[in-house]
Amino acid sequence: MKKKLLNKSNVLKEQLDKKRPLPNEVVKDMKEDFYIKNTYHSNAIEGNTLTLYETKAVLEDGITIQGKSFREHAEANNHKEAITYVEELINVESPLNQRIIKDIHAIVMQGIDRSIAGKYRNTAALITGANHTPPSHEKIQDEMDDLVDWCENVNDLHPVEKASLLHAKFVNVHPFSDGNGRTSRLLMNFELMKFGFPPITIEKDDRFRYYEVLDISGTKGDYEPFILFIAERAVNTLENHVDFLKDL
């Protein structure tokens, strides 16, 4: 099943690549749509109560939504800024390193909790509702050294599989006190975009399966269910792009 999905993603990417370069207006519209939907879903997974349309209003018009907290507004604006930062990294072909990981996290958490923004945790961590227990804070630096070294040197994996593993491995380390989920999804899309794949969105309605397959990777060391989960969404994203661009 995994091989079939990854092969399908290759075929769809080839179809998408044939459409490039895309008209500037089309690129702009696709980006704006992604900014809004990805920000909404990534934040909603973590408990942000802004609706899709409220997220659009905050991001596009700078509107303050009555009854919503400062933090929820900040999470929306920060997430969009973090996406654009990731895009800038792709444009200059920056390799992933721990400075970039910390910078992404700092953007995600800016104005929310300055004491932890861009800093590895110095306390124990608990992933609520999960069976996996992250490593102690004394081990985080070594774990992150190993993760970045793995990412730099693994060259025989399909980009979708590598992006999936980066996401899951990062979450299992849980290096920050807060904001790990958002940061992990941004890192996953960094890896996908680096290889020319469109970024994906894990939707709020899929969060229970998402939590389940992530927990399996942490407790059993079995990453296959999570890779399949991400590969399905990568294929779906590619299909939507190809269909949207079919008349170009």
Image (cartoon, rainbow, N blue to C red):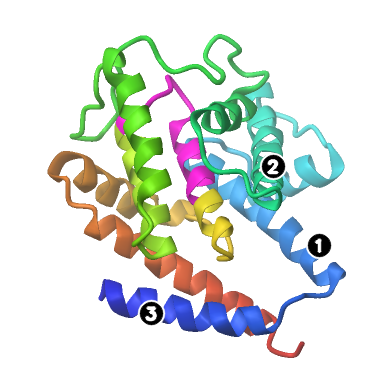
Residue 186 is a magenta residue: yes
Q: Is residue 226 visible?
A: yes
What residue is shown at x 27% (from left), y 18% (from top)?
A: 139
In this view, the residue farthest toward the left is: 220
Q: CA distance from mark 1 to mark 3?
A: 29 Å
Q: Position of residue 176 (x, y in %)?
A: 43, 22
Q: Residues within 10 Å of mark 2 (few under 14, many from 20)?
A: many
The mark that comes first in sequence, 3 or 2, is: 3
Q: Position of residue 202 (x, y in %)?
A: 47, 55
In the picture, measured across the screen, residue 2 lies left or right of residue 65, that is left
Tell me the kind of residue under disc 2.
Answer: Lys
Magenta: predominant secondary structure element? Answer: helix
Tell me the kind of residue under disc 3.
Answer: Asn
In the rendered image, which residue does mark 3 sit on?
A: 7
Residue 175 is a magenta residue: yes
In the rendered image, which residue does mark 1 sit on?
A: 28
In the rendered image, which residue does mark 2 sit on?
A: 80
Magenta stretch? 173-188
Q: Residues within 10 Å of mark 3 (few under 14, many from 20)?
A: some
Q: Residues within 10 Å of mark 1 (few under 14, many from 20)?
A: few
